[in-house]
Amino acid sequence: MAQDPFDWIDRHHARRHAAGLVRTLRPRPADSPLIDLAGNDYLGLTRHHEVTAAAAEAARRWGAGATGSRLVTGSTELHARLETELADFCGFEAALVFSSGYAANLAAVTALAAPADAAGPGTLLVSDAGNHASLIDGCRLARAGTAVVPHADPEAVRKTLEAHGGPALAVTDSVFSVDGDAAPLAALADACRAHGAALLVDDAHGLGVLGAGGRGAVHAAGLAGSPDVVATVTLSKSLGSQGGAILGPARVIRHLVSNARTFIFDTGLAPAAVGAALASLAVLRREPERAARARYVADALHGAVTAAGRVSVRPDAAVVSVRAPSPEAAVAWAVDCRAEGLAVGCFRPPSVPDGVSRLRLTARADLSDRQIEEAAATVVRTAPAA
């Protein structure tokens, strides 16, 4: 009998099951009764009436899909307007919209890593150990030399660049999705500039939460618009839509249009998502206090769970991470929270670089003070023994 080519999948599943690491899909209803601290709708805009109306109008006018890649038929006037608005809001010279934040990160890392040639060595990628999977995958796909440095350590970046002596690109999240801590962007930029390196920042968790009126962590660090700094953002968190973008100098954006494979060969972002993101930007410009409210909610959640004796890193933005004693305990904790009306995230290996399982609470600007109290009380009440 011929060998089953996929029997290894069953063995792999059995090992994951034994380790408590099996992941399952849980489709949610349109109107969930749960308090949602699991999604990334930081500003509470994904159901905002102006945002949903703009999405519907864009679909009616431009169609359900973009119809092709951006370089063929997938660029509409809406896409161009969103790119202009994003660049202006965040303080950059230009922007380029992608179908997802993941695609934007793959594009930025791979297209900005120059290959080795007769003129000199290729670009060294200097990547923070806590970076998101999309940045890690970008480093792998770039086929460039990659140095992984300790988490949030500008001195380690400086020493790595000194030892390299050639072209380099430092790559970091602005706010790390596991613990919610912020990167020391100003110090990282100083380290890069001392050695002629560029800095790429994934500001997915900073846009809408940090900086003046939610303009992002790069803007808050005074680096927006710098000729040696490039940022990526997602439209699926604070802006309540879907998609991603790269922000940077005009010559970088021009280079990406001709060289970024996830831009050239991917269908453009659907018009509805573009329309929704534009409407969310308009709301954020009009109501900049939403950013401060998201940070307040995160601080309140952190204060309540730490006061009850749970271990949690102080949040720098809207992500609150609460440690669990084991993967199994984290899963059970999340299930118990759900049973009591609260949806929370659950991070386990291999999603966490340090191997420590956590509950992940995402603050939302539209939560009432009573909902914050109820959510924190539920997390504390259902907590497993340490």
Image: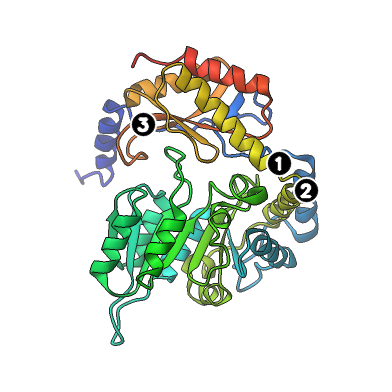
The tag earlier along the polypeptide, 3 or 2, is 3
Can see residue 100?
no
Circle 1 is placed at which residue position? 289
Residue 48 in the image, given as x and y percentages of width and height: 75, 40
Q: Is residue 314 left or right of residue 318?
A: left
Give neighbour class at mark 3: few <14, some 14-19, many 20+ (Cα, 10 Å). Answer: few
Give neighbour class at mark 1: few <14, some 14-19, many 20+ (Cα, 10 Å). Answer: some
**Callout 1: SS:** helix
Mark 3 or 2, which is nearer the eye? 2
- The foreground one among 353 and 89 is 89
Circle 2 is placed at which residue position? 286
Q: Is residue 348 left or right of residue 341?
A: left
Circle 3 is placed at which residue position? 22
Can see residue 124?
yes
Label 3 amino acid?
Val
Q: Residue at x 51, y 76 (%)?
A: 255
In the image as oriented, which residue stretches furthest toward the bottom? 118
Q: Residue at x 58, y 67 (%)?
A: 225
Total numbered badges shown on the rendered structure: 3
Q: Work out how far the residue at label 3 is from the one at label 2, CA to CA, in angstroms.
A: 43 Å
Colour mapping used in the image: rainbow
Give neighbour class at mark 2: few <14, some 14-19, many 20+ (Cα, 10 Å). Answer: few
Label 2 amino acid?
Arg
Mark 1 touches mark 3? (CB < 8 Å): no
Label 1 amino acid?
Glu
Mark 1 or 3, which is nearer the eye? 1
